[in-house]
Image (spheres, coloured by chain):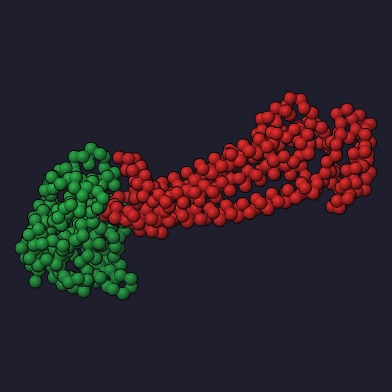
Chain colours: A green, B red
Amino acid sequence: MITFENVSKVYKGHVEALHGASADIEKGEFVFLVGPSGSGKSTMLRLINREETADKGRIFVAGKDIARLSSWRVPYLRRNIGCIFQDYKLLPNKTVYQNVAFALEVIGRPRHVVKAQVPAILELVGLESKTSNLPEELSGGEQQRVSIARAFVNRPLILLADEPTGNLDPTTSVGIMRLLDRINRTGTTVVMATHDRSIVDTMQRRVIELDMGEIIRDQVRGVYQ
Amino acid sequence: MKFDYIFRELTINLRRNITLTIAAIMTVAVSLALFGSTLLVRQGVDNVSQRWSNGIEVIAFLKADATADQRSAIETFIKQNPDVGKWHYVDPAASKAEAKRLFARNDLMLAKIDSGTRIPDSYRLSPTSKRINLMKSLGKQLQAQPGVLKVIDETESVKTVTAVSQFAQKAMLVVGVGLLVAALLLILNAIRMAMFARRREIEVMKLVGATNWFIRIPFMLEGIVQGLVGAVIALGAVAALDRAMNRAAANQDTQKIMEGFVATAGELRLTGLVVVILGVTIGAAGSRWALSRFLKV
């Protein structure tokens, strides 16, 4: 599903965020990216949905060499990739329902599809009773659930998560991880960058460890270390 | 869904930025009004000054009952006079055509011309030198010829008015173009502000895979609407000026046709089209510029 072939990325001529990274992520896998801040985790995620482009090497997503993707095709690549973040990136003036519906509206999905899919996904993430609340009226965990609903409502092949539990307490984090696990079980490939040792150790999934932009460990059913 | 969405976003953008939107619209309106009036006045003045082109400075209109002998006498006088340079004869049909062209869009005057008012034929002369005395004395001599109805010359006042109007046109054009540039920058900034106000939405839209055009269209339309509304206001001002020019011309009597100095109406439809196209272009260019500079996709 995702292949990195000897990928390097240098920011503004100096900082080498990624150096000769190679990895192969199969469809339906759940992968943790771990490592200290600045080790290249977020860069890997940003390369996958082509927010950044690689300076060297090749990246394949769903069988396509994304470096060769012309820029007008990038939005169509992103429709297959859901993203969630530490800071949720919800729209503060839209309700829970509107936040999720927005993701479908702006890619031109017809109204009846929006009407059918949004309530279903909100039920899946357990927010069916909060559809008309604004984000500021929700707890951090609930806000992250909205952002997961928004990322998953279009049933993407891949879900990228950049420290999704970074702002949440351990109990809430467990709930979020259960949700991501459930989404993974539907066949969605999940790639998650995290600092959360207990989550990685508990889940026992594949771990890719980065340090100074290099992959120093790639372990099936790994732990944080 | 898409049209709903675009319309909703457009109105939100326009309202959120209301002061900047109004500033942009007003600047577009004032600049295009100046621009349009300049075009209109220029067409009018061109019509008037055309008969004074090619150095023609003296015109002798003939009486309706001028005999063939009188005519040949006048012609002989002109041919033999060393002070006359180029000259030509304008027959009644050509004179009528000229009057009709001058008042092409003025129904009242056209009716007068068509109702059988005779537009006299004339000899048009250009003196060999620019000395004002020469022009005057030529005029006097011609006036003394039997069969001549009236002699007019390109008086100093005509020259002055033409010169002043040319200067005013240039000044208006400069101010108009300056304001047009200001309007472009205001629209650029309005769009930039709108994009800044909506940066979160734009970020999310990019993340979930909205196409570049989908993200851009509401902003493009915002600029175009600003340009268009400004153009429509300018169009109103230009049309009002056109009406005033027409009314002023209609109040003149046919005698003035001969004297040839009436401000006539220009081609309002063409001017309007130019104004609207300019307005839309300015709006589109301003937003296009803002998008290419500040929207990385």
Quadrant including the C terminus of chain B: bottom left
Residue B201, horizontal then vertical, whole percent: 29, 53
Quarter holding residue A190: bottom left
Residue at left offset 66%, top offset 51%: B168
Is residue A213 found left or right of A177 in the rendered image? right
Residue A195, horizontal then vertical, whole percent: 14, 67
Quadrant including the N terminus of chain B: top left
Whether residue A119 is situated above or below residue A68 in the rendered picture: above
Whether residue B113 is situated above or below residue B244 in the rendered picture: above
Residue B86, horizontal then vertical, whole percent: 85, 46
Q: Return the residue nearer the eye: A37 or B243.
A: B243
Residue at left offset 9%, top offset 71%: A225
| Number of numbered callouts drawn | 0
Whether residue B218 is situated above or below residue B254 in the rendered picture: below
Residue at left offset 34%, top offset 50%: B215
Residue at left offset 41%, top offset 48%: B222
Q: Is residue A120 visible?
A: yes
Question: Residue at the top extreme?
Answer: B115
